[in-house]
Image (cartoon, rainbow, N blue to C red):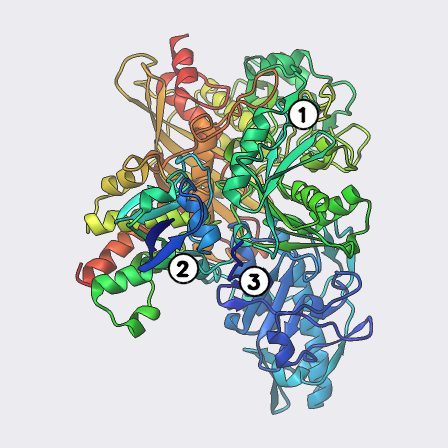
């Protein structure tokens, strides 16, 4: 085969080159500048016995070079958030008082070259991500060193642009660390290969917000240049010497076991080979096209048992309410619960009793999962992939093969967004690439095809919620009660290992206490924002994954957290119900929300979308609302959410054609108050993207399934929003430095659309929509009813 | 054996002639611009220009490109340089204005679909120098075998980048 001209370990990320790290001796001592220039440029990695960095060493996080350049490392992988390449550089530059441009290298994801693990979520750590604390510790150690070197008290030193000044003397960081060693131990806690990874502990002094110079500016994402100029090494580009291409022949249904594997027609595919492990069947070949064609031929002659153990999506909510076991799992209660809701509702003059339904949705990355697995003869296992949590994958692969994590290295590369699907360690192809590689003794690249990516991946959990509320004579909520029902939302078992019968973590169960991972517990994840309500009850009911226990494979409909996980399922019914309650009270739905909120920041985002969107302050429905006819009718809707330190609101204006049920979102205004805005341009792009995904989820998305498995298989059977369908989008960033922290800026944007659009349908037509997605057929039936 | 011209260079292809062009470009010629998104001509991640027209390489057999000119994302700077009559030295330092606009507007989120978006933008702006918003949306939605899909939702940023590229290309005299 043709040898590649790309060497994956020399992956160059934009202007930021990846460099190797050589650890200094002594567990608690690190030399910041002990790495020579030659070593820095060498593509050969420093071999260590553990294939891990010591997270207690400052140099594992921040490395300062004699030339005043700085390297930072993070276990977080970029999936399009840009944070590691923008906000993290800004945050480190700020804490070190160094120029943004001095941070020339950002090492992300690789399990042997980054210290802390964790998934690609919550990058900003509610204001104190690991990298910020690590940088703050390093800054203090640098000041100690400068104090010694300059003979000036630490308190008399100041730092600007990476130059320490005091007592009439000054020295650059680069000169300061030259040949020096810093005594510093970074305190960490946690489990490296768990979903949360390690956490930097303690409270190092951090820079006051009032002195920020770098945070708040719109720096560009350094990886953009290499991506748009085709110079990036994506995971899809990795080619290893001797590598074979693999394609999977997945079971016929989500519960089928293997009767007999097909054989390769050697006259057509002389170089292909079938691999069977338990119920897992794969085909490998030297070229990709042969692997594709041969796997199709083998699939045609492979025999499976039949299985029909799923309710089918037409019966989903009937099954969830009547067939699922809600008794085995403890009910969770809101810590904001207060008063006596049943008593308050009983005597309320106006009541709302409603059920809201939320379908299975797919993460649907634009490229299907792929990975290169390389099980070497020395017992080490290397995986090259795009994964939101490489350290967790490392742990899962070690468990699967009965080895220890020091034998496993995960090499992280850019790839398509996963939106949470791999934040627990796998997206689907990784373990299968390893299984096939082990079987054939060569590196194997497994690429799922489009249908497999819909049918064998996890999905965002379906849910339903029952709401009861009562309004008093003044139109205020006297009591509010919501019961959320959702199957286990995070199954991190690698699917290939499950099919092959190899060891994995257990399927989600009552006994697994580590909510949300592996637990059936449905925690309350949508923080209540209407503190003016005097009687409140919120409960979370959990159950097992649909069909999983009945499946002979132990698979069924596996779920996984997806952008705004759990909270989306809980916020849709809450916000839809609040809009209905406002209508019941005869009040404008923004005014109604403001009347029930006490926090300034909740009120702030609501006022912002009211003032910025062209909102008409009046009750719903619109005076001209109609639910029939071929002429478009227009309506408006609003929603609000608090997530990860950030307050969000959106207002949308839509047009509905009653005769067809077709909905067009015409204008979409979204207000974001994260406290401190770290990078306005990047935040704006994140919010716009989340808004578009959210409109897509609300209007179009539902993973269809029958009694045997997912029936969605491509972009026609699982459509997503097209460019022609986007509204005018207005993003309002509310920078509030006085808050003192920065909240998350990506998740939540996708969840706001659904309840706002549902409310706008009511505003336009007078008919209430309580089920997603808001597809024309559903809306048309609703309006005709 | 099939001979195709890729980014101005004649290439003799050893792979079977029914091999989709995408696998030839990625695996035989080591070009990483076009991506595998669906293999069904439904998303546009694999787009390349064939004789200046945007096609989906994932289902187009390499034989369909025999004797023809293929331009990938890698070839956009040289394509622009040739159209503008730039010297080789100038060309080596430049990106296509479309790529530059994608940087200025910070368009990509994950970026996996953006190859096809920039290829489609090139086809559009070579034919319609100053497209209206409607024309841009039409180009990315209905002009090809399928809409160009972005799961991250970067459509607004794509529209702004196309408009920016149109302006810079017009200033450069086309």
| Viewer-side label of 3, 2 | 3
3 or 1: tag closer to the N-terminus: 3
With respect to residue B1, does B141 lie above or below?
above
Mark 2 nearby-residue class (10 Å; few <14, some 14–19, many ≥20): many
Q: Residue A487: which disc?
A: 1
Question: Rounded to the nearest whole Å, what is the CA distance between mark 3 and mark 2?
Answer: 18 Å
Residue beneath label 2, please?
A229
Residue B84 location (% of width, % of height): 21, 64
Q: Residue A7: which disc?
A: 3
Residue at position x 72%, y 46% in the image: A438
- Would residue B123 be found to the left or right of residue A282 on screen? left
Q: Quadrant of residue A696?
A: top left
Question: Rounded to the nearest whole Å, what is the CA distance between mark 2 and mark 1?
Answer: 43 Å
Choose between A149 and A410: the one closer to the eye: A410
Q: Element type at marker 2?
A: loop
Choose between A128 and A14: the one closer to the eye: A14
Residue at position x 40%, y 50% in the image: B115
Q: Quadrant of residue A115?
A: bottom right
Q: Element type at marker 3?
A: loop
Mark 3 nearby-residue class (10 Å; few <14, some 14–19, many ≥20): few
């Amino acid at each position: 085969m043709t040898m590649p001209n790309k060497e994956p370990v020399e992956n160059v990320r934009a202007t930021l080159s990846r460099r190797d790290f050589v650890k200094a001796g002594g567990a608690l001592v690190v030399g910041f500048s002990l790495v020579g220039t030659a070593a820095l440029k060498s593509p050969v990695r420093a071999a260590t016995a553990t294939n891990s960095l010591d997270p207690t060493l400052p140099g594992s996080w921040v490395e300062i070079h004699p030339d005043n350049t700085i390297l930072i490392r993070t276990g977080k992988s970029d999936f399009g958030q840009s944070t590691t390449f923008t906000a993290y550089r800004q945050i480190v530059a700020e804490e070190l008082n160094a120029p943004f441009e001095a941070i020339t290298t950002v090492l992300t994801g690789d399990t042997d070259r980054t210290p802390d693990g964790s998934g690609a979520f919550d990058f900003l750590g509610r204001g104190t991500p690991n990298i910020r604390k690590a940088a703050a510790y390093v800054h203090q150690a640098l000041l100690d060193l400068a104090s010694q070197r300059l003979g000036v008290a630490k308190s008399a030193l100041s730092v600007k642009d990476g130059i320490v000044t005091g007592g009439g003397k000054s020295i650059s960081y680069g000169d300061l660390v030259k040949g020096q060693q810093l005594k510093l131990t970074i305190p960490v806690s946690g489990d490296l290969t768990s979903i949360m990874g390690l956490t930097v502990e303690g409270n190092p002094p951090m820079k006051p917000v009032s002195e920020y110079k770098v945070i708040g500016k719109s720096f560009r994402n350094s990886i953009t240049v290499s991506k748009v100029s085709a110079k990036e090494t994506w995971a899809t580009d990795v080619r290893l010497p001797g590598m074979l291409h693999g394609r999977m022949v997945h079971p016929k249904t989500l519960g089928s076991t293997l009767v007999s594997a097909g054989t390769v027609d050697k006259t057509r595919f002389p170089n292909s080979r079938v691999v069977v492990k338990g119920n897992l069947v794969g085909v490998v070949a030297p070229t990709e096209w042969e692997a594709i064609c041969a796997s199709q031929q083998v699939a045609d002659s492979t025999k499976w048992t039949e299985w029909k153990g799923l309710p089918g999506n037409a019966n989903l909510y009937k099954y969830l309410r009547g067939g699922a076991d809600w008794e085995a799992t403890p009910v969770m209660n809101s810590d904001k619960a207060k008063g006596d809701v049943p008593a308050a509702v009983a005597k309320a003059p106006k009541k709302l009793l409603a059920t809201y339904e939320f379908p299975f949705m797919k993460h649907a990355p634009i490229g299907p999962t792929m990975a290169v697995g390389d099980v070497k003869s020395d017992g080490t296992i290397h995986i090259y992939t795009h994964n939101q949590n490489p350290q967790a994958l490392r742990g899962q692969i070690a468990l699967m093969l009965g080895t220890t994590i020091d034998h496993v290295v995960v090499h992280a590369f850019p790839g398509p967004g996963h939106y949470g699907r791999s934040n627990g360690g796998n997206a689907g192809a990784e373990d299968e690439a390893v299984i096939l590689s082990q079987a054939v003794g060569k590196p194997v690249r497994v690429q799922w095809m489009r249908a497999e990516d819909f049918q064998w991946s996890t999905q965002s959990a379906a849910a339903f919620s029952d709401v009861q509320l009562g309004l008093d004579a003044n139109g205020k909520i006297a009591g509010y009660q919501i019961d959320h029902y959702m199957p286990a939302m995070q199954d991190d078992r690698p699917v290939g290992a499950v099919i092959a019968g190899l060891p994995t973590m257990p399927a989600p169960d009552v006994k697994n206490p580590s909510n949300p991972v592996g637990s059936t517990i449905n925690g309350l994840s949508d923080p209540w924002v209407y503190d003016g309500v005097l009687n409140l009850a919120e409960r979370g009911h959990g159950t097992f994954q649909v069909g999983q226990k009945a499946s002979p494979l132990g698979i069924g409909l596996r779920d996984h957290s997806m952008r705004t996980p759990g909270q989306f399922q809980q916020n849709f019914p809450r916000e839809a119900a609040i809009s209905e309650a406002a209508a019941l009270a005869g009040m404008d739905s923004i005014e109604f929300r403001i009347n029930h909120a006490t926090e300034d920041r909740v009120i702030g985002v609501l006022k912002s979308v009211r003032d910025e969107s062209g909102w008409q302050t009046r009750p719903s429905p619109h005076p001209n609302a109609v639910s029939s006819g071929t002429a478009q009718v227009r309506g408006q809707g609003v929603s609000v959410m608090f997530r990860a330190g950030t307050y969000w609101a959106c207002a949308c204006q839509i047009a509905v054609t009653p005769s067809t049920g077709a909905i067009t979102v015409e204008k979409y205004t979204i207000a974001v108050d994260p406290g401190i805005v770290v990078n306005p341009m990047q935040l704006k792009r994140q919010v716009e993207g989340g808004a578009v995904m959210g409109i897509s989820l609300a209007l179009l998305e539902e993973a269809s399934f029958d009694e045997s498995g997912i029936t969605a298989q491509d972009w026609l059977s699982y459509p997503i929003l097209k460019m022609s369908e986007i509204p005018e989008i207005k993003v309002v960033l509310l920078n509030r430095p006085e808050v003192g922290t920065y909240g998350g800026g990506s998740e939540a944007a996708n969840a706001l659309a659904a309840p706002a659009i549902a409310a706008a349908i009511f505003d336009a037509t007078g008919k209430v929509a309580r089920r997603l997605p808001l597809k024309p057929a559903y809306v048309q039936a609703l309006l005709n009813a | 054996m099939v001979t195709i011209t890729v980014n101005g260079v004649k290439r003799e292809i050893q792979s079977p002639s029914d091999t989709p062009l995408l696998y030839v470009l990625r695996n035989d010629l080591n070009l990483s611009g076009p991506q595998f998104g669906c293999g069904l001509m439904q998303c546009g991640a694999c787009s390349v220009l064939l004789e200046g027209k945007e096609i989906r390489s994932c289902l187009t057999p390499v034989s369909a490109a025999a004797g023809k000119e293929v331009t990938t994302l890698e070839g956009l700077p040289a394509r622009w340089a040739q159209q503008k009559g730039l010297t080789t030295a100038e060309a080596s330092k430049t990106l296509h204005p479309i790529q530059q606009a994608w940087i200025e507007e910070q368009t990509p989120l994950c970026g996996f679909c953006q190859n096809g978006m920039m290829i489609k933008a090139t086809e559009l702006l070579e034919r319609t120098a100053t497209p209206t918003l409607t024309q841009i949306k039409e180009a990315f939605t209905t002009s090809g075998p399928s809409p160009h899909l972005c799961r991250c939702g970067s459509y607004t940023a794509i529209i702004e980048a196309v408009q920016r590229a149109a302006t810079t290309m017009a200033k450069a005299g086309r």
